[in-house]
Image (cartoon, grey):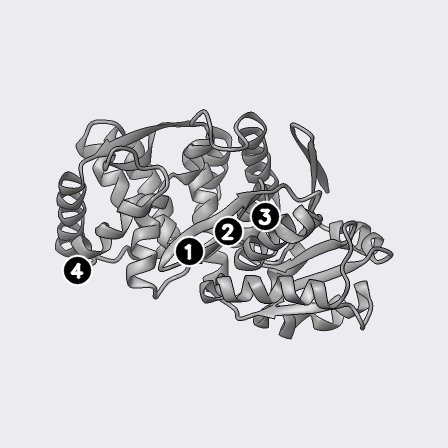
Amino acid sequence: MKDIVIETGIQHSVVHCGSGAYEKYAYALADRQIFVVTDSNVFAWYRYEIWKTFGDEVPIYIVPAGETGKTLRNLTAILKGMLKYGMKRNCTVIAFGGGVVGDIAGLAASLYMRGVHLVQIPTTLLAQVDSSVGGKTAIDFEGVKNVIGSFYQPETVIADPRFLTTLADREIRCGLGEIVKYGALNGEIFDLLERNIGNLTSLEFLEEITSLCIQHKADVVIRDEHDLNGLRKTLNLGHTTGHAFELYYRKKSHGEFVLIGMYYELYIAEKLNTCPRNYSERLKKLIIDVLKKVPAYDDVEAAAELAKFDKKNVDKQISIVVPKSIGESAELKLDLDEYIKMLKECAAQLKERK
């Protein structure tokens, strides 16, 4: 078990990661005034664990499982529930679930009485390696992903691999999407991924690499908590195209779309001589090891239109973060027409390889 401390200004966040973290730290929260936010899938699996840990009368709000739960309506319902149960200024919101739960519960905690305590207990691989750490909270609005949100650090994150044993294969792939992203940003993680190719879903490997991913993100957040100097922007590698495809095609998980977006953006990086072909092919091999197959999408022009809403964009140009060399990345800015043209070329190349 490892503890990772994130110091950002006046806020102090601790991530407890590894086997035994839940038993050691979650039960210690039971004497607080608690409001639990979870989703329908997680509640079905872990309702008795929640009641055992926090009491069978603990107030709970259950959002629908999946991205459709990140709505203004559910955010309002959480806040109404907190008010109904008399939550005080020193109460603690516990986000018990995956990325969607962490995002919406974190936003609710940041808003209620101008900010109450927040504890993240991530139950998916993606949430453990990425979304529960760093303090980004959000909901989707008017068809745009994460457009309403805040920066709000949890006081504690409890990332225990015990929860990974109940995940479907698709959820593991989803988390591996973010892990491969970290591999494109961090040489140590990239080396570990390459050495374990073909064995990326083993629990032993996932526990080892989770702490490395968390440490990388913590180092970035400490230096650029609010996305002001461009460093935190690197954590969006693969996400511009991934988010656009996710909003348009919808049939895969967020992490899978991150990998698909990374693959398409690697084509652009190669085309613009930003990423050497040899390194690009090594990253693509990791992507294929997880996905098995990258979709050759039709209608990429319509999907690419959604990239215009990406928060990194400046002056009507599409911003993408791409691998440059092992442990290094670069930001590229493209006119929309150029961006669409290269996405089409990549899709055509994928069709030829079928």
Can residue 225 be seen at all in this image of the molecule?
yes
The kind of residue tagged 1 is His
Q: Give percent across and percent down for residue 49.
A: 75, 67
Q: Say which residue label 4 marks.
A: 298
- Horizontal side, residue 232 vs residue 250: left or right: right
Instruction: Give the SS element for disc 1.
Output: helix
Instruction: Give the SS element for disc 4.
Output: loop
Taking the spot 80% from the left edge, 63% from the top edge, the residue there is 53
Q: Disc 1 vs disc 2: which is toward the camera?
A: 2
- 318 vs 345, nearest the viewer: 318
Q: CA distance from mark 4 to mark 2?
A: 30 Å
Report which quarter residue 314 is drawn in: top left
Q: CA distance from mark 4 to mark 1?
A: 19 Å
- 217 vs 62, nearest the viewer: 62
The kind of residue tagged 2 is Ala
- Horizontal side, residue 159 vs residue 147: left or right: right
Taking the spot 44% from the left edge, 51% from the top edge, the residue there is 146
Q: Say which residue label 3 marks.
A: 132
Q: Image height check: is 296 above or below 8? A: below
Q: Say which residue label 2 marks.
A: 138
Local crowd size for mark 1, using a 10 Å CA cut-off: few (<14), some (14–19), many (≥20): many
Disc on the earlier residue, 3 or 4? 3
Q: CA distance from mark 3 to mark 2?
A: 12 Å
- Horizontal side, residue 162 vs residue 242: left or right: right
The kind of residue tagged 3 is Ser
Disc on the earlier residue, 4 or 1? 1
Q: Image height check: is 315 above or below 43? A: above
Q: Disc 3 vs disc 4: which is toward the camera?
A: 3
Report which quarter residue 209 is drawn in: top right
Q: Give percent across and percent down for residue 303.
A: 23, 55
Local crowd size for mark 3, using a 10 Å CA cut-off: few (<14), some (14–19), many (≥20): many
